[in-house]
Amino acid sequence: MNILVCISQVPDTTTKVKFTENNTKLDTGGIQWVINPWDELSLTRALELKDDPSSGVQKVSVAHVGPASNEATIRKALAIGADDAYRVDTDALDAYQVAAQLAELVKTGSFDIILCGIESSDYNGSNVGGMLAEFLDYTSVSGISQLEISEGKAIVNREIDGGKESLAVSLPFVGIVQKGIAKEPRIAAMRGIMMARKKPINVTAAKDIAPLTEVKEFEPPKPRPACKFVDPDNPAELIELLQNEAKVI
Amino acid sequence: MSVLLYTENWEGKFKKLTFELASYASGVAEMLGTGVTAVSIGSVDDQELKKLGEYGVGKILKADNEATGQFDTGVYAKIIADAADKENAEIIIMANNNAGKAIAPRLSVRLKAGVASAVSELPVSVSPFFIKKRVFSGNAVAGTEIKTEKKIVTLSQNSFDLAEKPADIIIENFDAAAGGPSGNIEVREVERQSGKLLLTDAEIVVSGGRGMKSPDNWGPIEEFAKLLGGATACSRPVSDEGWRPHEEHTGQTGKIIAPNLYFAIGISGATQHLAGISASKVIVAINNDKDAPIFDAAQYGIVGDASKVLPKLVEALKEAKSA
Ligand SMILES: Cc1cc2nc3c(=O)[nH]c(=O)nc-3n(C[C@H](O)[C@H](O)[C@H](O)COP(=O)(O)OP(=O)(O)OC[C@H]3O[C@@H](n4cnc5c(N)ncnc54)[C@H](O)[C@@H]3O)c2cc1C
Ligand SMILES: Nc1ncnc2c1ncn2[C@@H]1O[C@H](COP(=O)(O)O)[C@@H](O)[C@H]1O
């Protein structure tokens, strides 16, 4: 059984994002790129399953749609423990274009479980996983917080409003993961970093697929008013402000 | 041409979110000079469906058959796509919640419709279709153009005011051509916390961080939340430590919420935490460090020891309520 983990790279969450060219482009100067946090957790879970022989998982691959300059991020995934990697050589233009490229890649391989994150922390789209499933006509389950394999099926927990469900899902399927899938992301050890240099990154040419959306300009969020401080010995004043000034209670 | 709204139901009932969506859909329909049709999947009685008419929905397609009993996103996307075709819908609107996030991308591929997700405002223009959405975990807004003929918008919860606009409503049975359930998903167990106010639905949220020191100190937080009719939440380390259940964790890797009022108590205000709460209308911070970054995000603040301030705040609220 083979697992494919789709990874996107995002600015490290502590980066202050800035824009250039009249706020039409992200200023990539000074950005630390990291594997999208959920993808790191999916990869961790996939590797945990592979470590357990009874799961039947033989291989864990990662896939990324992006230019050669993103290979450092792919190498990180290999250093963490992925067996091999696929890169579709094109800039990521929007979720639709990315998912379409990933679908082409999946069709040429043999993957039983495909994992995507619930969202990329840059464009916060929450779209690629579901789109990929629809392109492939695979079942998808979103909001997965647990993944096991048993008797050739994926046993997953999915969060629903106000509760959770445990499901048995036939393979192949696309799992869209969220918090809980793994506790802490696995980090690369020295040995892994050395080994990653020898692991293959299979590069494929992109299909000609146009995006459906385009970001035209960015705006910083509206500034918040300065904080009004209330005397700790007079909390009644806070209640009064919330009632009569902010009118929220 | 019309605007199509997908209305999820919770055990046959709608909630405020549904009416926010209907209000939003009416606003979009007005910009286009058209009306709103809602598609409801699963079993909802007509009396409940009619409530949508209060917020400008003129027609409801009711899809209730054996395929709709189980939440299989592929099947749901098919039903909504059929409804969109039937209504010649140009814009399809749904919530940016668990269900919406699962369905919208599948629908997008099916209809070749571009998606703007986590939107909290009406489009800037409908032709070209230009809309603002939050990006970089709330650290920026992106003005996005959807270039396709059909468009999908997912609306963030508690971000759009209800707008009453009574309309005459027609309810039609909709025999979706989705076929039976796919058979690929077998539900083994369902766990529901019934009767509890969901964090995502709460208009007031009282949240505690590591500055609360111990899980034993949550009493006043719970009491305060209860008095305010709100829900409780926490920062990530608090849920990681097992002090609080993981459903309460807010932030970039937890729940993203936008209540009217958010109390951050003993929470430093790390960017990853703010990513989940910065859309709150009013943030109140209680922290013993006057330089804690949470005060940059807060509108009101108290510098002090939470273990002393919070009980006094609870008393003050009780007094104000009894006055
Ligand atoms: C990839 C990634 C994702 C993350 N996602 C999230 C997320 O989704 N949500 C999240 O919350 N965090 C997240 N984090 C963690 C985040 O960076 C912070 O570590 C975390 O938010 C800190 O939690 P805290 O404010 O409760 O604790 P601390 O940072 O320890 O802050 C405690 C605060 O309490 C104050 N305090 C101490 N004693 C008292 C007292 N007696 N009275 C009043 N105040 C007191 C202190 O001054 C301090 O400001 C993430 C981190 C990473 C790397
Ligand atoms: N460029 C990309 N290459 C590979 N996978 C991606 C890419 N962008 C997004 N993904 C996957 O899709 C998930 C959700 O992304 P998004 O729809 O952009 O929020 C991510 O967590 C990844 O698993």
Image (tube, grey):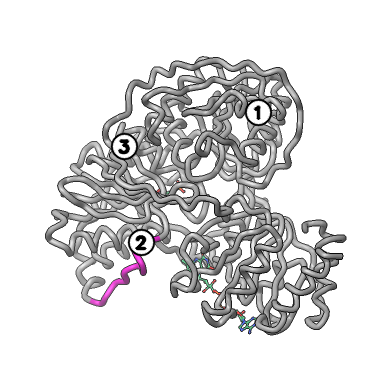
The amino acid type, in three-letter code, at marker 3 is: Thr
Identity of the residue drawn at 13% across and 54% down: A56
Q: What is the spatial separation of the Cα atoms under label 1 and label 3, in whole angstroms? A: 31 Å
- Label 1 residue SS: helix
Q: Are marks 1 and 3 on the same chain?
A: no
Q: Which mark is residue A139?
A: 3
Quadrant assignment for the N terminus of chain B: top right
Q: Is residue B64 above or below residue A100?
A: above
Secondary structure mainly formed by the magenta segment: loop
The amino acid type, in three-letter code, at marker 1 is: Leu
Identity of the residue drawn at 85% across and 67% down: A240
Closer mark to the observer between disc 3 and disc 2: 3
Residue hosting label 2: A41
Closer mark to the observer between disc 1 and disc 3: 1
Identity of the residue drawn at 75% across and 62% down: A224
User: Is ligand 2 within 8 Å of the beta carbon of the residue shown at mark 3?
Assistant: no
Question: Residues in magenta?
Answer: A180-190
Q: Are marks 3 and 2 on the same chain?
A: yes
- Label 3 residue SS: strand
In the picture provided, is A76 more to the left or to the right than B251? left
Q: Which percent across, then down, holds residue B108?
A: 46, 32
Identity of the residue drawn at 72% across and 56% down: B281
Residue hosting label 1: B52
Comparing B99 with A50, the one in front is B99
The amino acid type, in three-letter code, at marker 2 is: Leu
The subunit carrying tag 1 is: B
The subunit carrying tag 2 is: A
B120 is within the stretch colored magenta:
no
Q: Earlier in the sequence, mark 3 or mark 2?
A: 2
